Amino acid sequence: MTENKIEIRGLHKAFGKKKVLDGVDIDVKKGESLVVIGGSGTGKSVLIKCIQGILTPDSGSIKIDDVDITQISHKEAEQSYAKMGMLFQGAALFDSLKVWENVAFGLIENQKMPRREAKTEAIRVLRQVGLAPDVADLSPSELSGGMQKRVGLARAIATKPEIIFFDEPTTGLDPIMSDVINDLIIESVKGIGATALTITHDMASARKIADKIAMLYKGKIIWQGTVKEMDKTDNPYVKQFIKGSSQGPISVEV
Amino acid sequence: MEKFLRRLGKTGVTFICRLGELSLFIGRALYNCMTPPFYFKLLGRQFLDIGFYSLPVVALTTIFAGMVIALQTYSGFSSYGAESAVAAVVLISVTRELAPVFCGLMVAGRIGAAMAAEIGTMRVTEQIDALTTLSTNPFKYLVTPRILAGIIVLPLLVIVGDIIGIFGGYVVSIYQLDFNPANYINSTIDELQTIDIVTGLIKGAVFGFIISLMGCYNGYKSRGGAQGVGEATTNAVVTSSILILIFNYIITGMLFTK
Ligand SMILES: Nc1ncnc2c1ncn2[C@@H]1O[C@H](COP(=O)(O)OP(=O)(O)OP(=O)(O)O)[C@@H](O)[C@H]1O
Ligand SMILES: [Mg+2]
């Protein structure tokens, strides 16, 4: 048994002629927080959707706790998928359900927890992400974007998953709310001892929550290291990305 | 010429792809209808949505259909023997054709559109992906209850439509055409055959399947934001309405021509 919680080798995924992932290799150790950075449309969301079985990769291996989920049927891999939780880019709350039912969804549907008990638990998790209990009975459309992100976070951590994915947790939020979300991510991940894989282009957020940072460019991981190493690196791609400059080797196709 | 052929080929290929995709979708839907887990609560909600809340439109359309058939038949048969003829024609046309088709078309407009819009929105806002990440099979959670409910509820709606449509014919015959109520009822009962009811039930089940299938399929495959959802909604209503009329003809053909 290796200490890698997630181990990805040579992951390829194309849509039609368009190669999105072109041989991605990633390791995430147990309890570690990896942040993947990269420009818009480089396939960051596609990467985590492949890991979660929402998309089927064309080739390559994805090992979760040493089980290669690309080699077994979706049904057999369900055990691995059950270990994962996810905060979506747009929160993706179920708008036909109330806030607390969203948070308690995994508890009720999979862990078969009685509704009343699940509601108490949902309110506890909501409080953990800084939302008052009276939010629980609202519908998701009545919440602001920042609150929706928090509810999405609460839903992701309610089942106490071993691996949590955050897809751009801070996009579209003001800097203060972003920082609040960052703190919540750190707290909740450490709180349940989870392994985290976060996608972002918000460098402040990346610095704060990352143990390790990897950069995705043209379908490959072109650089990885700690935040300290990132500040010292002379990799021109990384330097350009963290400076946020339009001058450099990364060309933006407009 | 070459351009034309090329376009023809492309359309053909797209059509065949769609057909394949749809067959896969049907297969998956049917498979998931038969394997656990079942979401009975969601099924119950669909019964309400598709069945109960459609009662007013079904009642309105079928009562006027029954009424207009009574009037039209009377003007055709004029005076002699009109009483039993009107009763028979109302009975047969309502139970065999009008009630099933009107139920089908009304529910397609009401429910098919709503299904496509709801599932389509869930698709483009990643709610369907979110279901997967919460270890819930989106097919079982969204598609299966709708399809089962469609198959079960539509026949019941058709029966309600039968009764109300015949009642519409009765009202016109008695109050406008001055027929004898007892005679009218007697001729209706005399004319009633099992096949009339069975036809309605079969058509109802098939139409219910078509409506839910098209609503779910178009919603499930929708892409690209609000516009995609809009397209899915239109497609769901248009395709299910056309399919309902086509299958109505086919089923009538199979049941009534020997
Ligand atoms: N289901 C799909 N079908 C076809 N193409 C897709 C699909 N999903 C993603 N793509 C394409 O893959 C590319 C990468 O998309 P992805 O959503 O992973 O980008 P991203 O890195 O997450 O960008 P962003 O930072 O803007 O969220 C895009 O060009 C997109 O058009
Ligand atoms: Mg993305």
Image: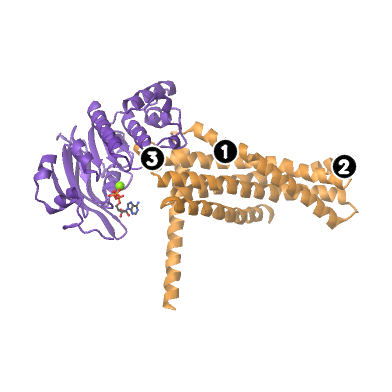
Q: Write down the quadrant of residue B175 in the picture.
A: top right
Q: Are marks 3 and 2 in contact (CB under 8 Å)?
A: no
Measured as percent of width and height from the top left, residue B242 is found at 58, 56
Q: Write down the colour of chain A.
A: purple
Measured as percent of width and height from the top left, residue A133 is found at 40, 24
Q: State the mark number for residue B65.
A: none
Of the pair B21 and B117, the residue shown nearer to us:
B117
The residue where tag 1 is placed is B49
Q: Which chain letter matches label 3?
A: A
- The amino acid type found where label 3 is placed reads Ala
Task: Please tell me how crowded label 3 is: few (under 14), some (14-19), or many (20+) other residues with Cα within 10 Å.
Answer: many
The residue where tag 3 is placed is A92
Picture mark count: 3
Q: State the mark number for residue B183.
A: 2
User: What chain is the orange one?
Assistant: B
Tell me: residue A22, above or below residue B202: below
Task: Please tell me how crowded label 2 is: few (under 14), some (14-19), or many (20+) other residues with Cα within 10 Å.
Answer: few
Q: Which chain letter matches label 2?
A: B
Q: Which chain letter matches label 1?
A: B
Residue furthest out toward the right: B80
Q: Can residue B209 be seen in this view?
A: no
- The amino acid type found where label 1 is placed reads Asp
* Precedes in sequence: disc 1 or disc 2: 1
Q: Do the residues labelled 1 and 2 touch (CB within 8 Å)?
A: no
